[in-house]
Image (tube, rainbow, N blue to C red):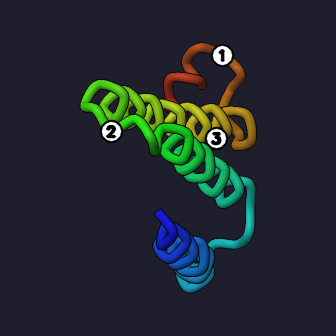
Amino acid sequence: MRWLWVPALAWLVSYPLTNAMLGYGWDWQLFLSVAGFGLAIGMGWLLRHHRSLLPMFGGSVAAAVLFYAVSNLGSWFLLPYPRTWEGFWQAQT
């Protein structure tokens, strides 16, 4: 667990650099991705002492759903999607 910062730091450095190389700027999508991964890492940190299958599987599913919800709900709120059910559905795909 003490080396967890290595892949997290590598992603945190490479993701904005890749976006910049592709011509994307610093926007809310970057913040939402970082926040989603941070929440997933936090859930893993909280479950670090539960090494049985069910808590690990449940935590993995919960972290994936949480990241999906943070990134897609954030896109729906921050990008120009209509504030309707159809706009919400479009943001999810």
- The image shows a total of numbered marks equal to 3
Write the residue at 63% across / 57% down.
34
Residue type (three-letter) at the residue carrying disc 1:
Thr
Numbered circle sitting on residue 12: none
**Element assignment for label 2:** loop
- Residue 69, percent from left and from top: 55, 31
Q: Residues within 10 Å of mark 1 (few under 14, many from 20)?
A: few
**Three-letter code for the amino acid on which mark 3 is drawn:** Ser
Distance between mark 3 and mark 1 Cα atoms: 14 Å
The earlier-in-sequence mark between 3 and 1 is 3
Disc 3 to disc 2, how far (Cα)?
A: 34 Å
Check if mark 2's residue and mark 1's residue have beta carbons within 8 Å.
no
| Image-based side of 13 in relation to 78, left or right | left
Sooner in the amino-acid sequence: mark 3 or mark 2: 2
For disc 2, the marked residue is 51
Label 3 sits on a secondary structure element that is helix
Q: Which mark is residue 84?
A: 1
Q: Position of residue 78 (x, y in %)?
A: 74, 41
Q: Is residue 80 above or below residue 61?
A: below
Q: Which mark is residue 75?
A: 3
Q: Quadrant of the C terminus?
A: top left
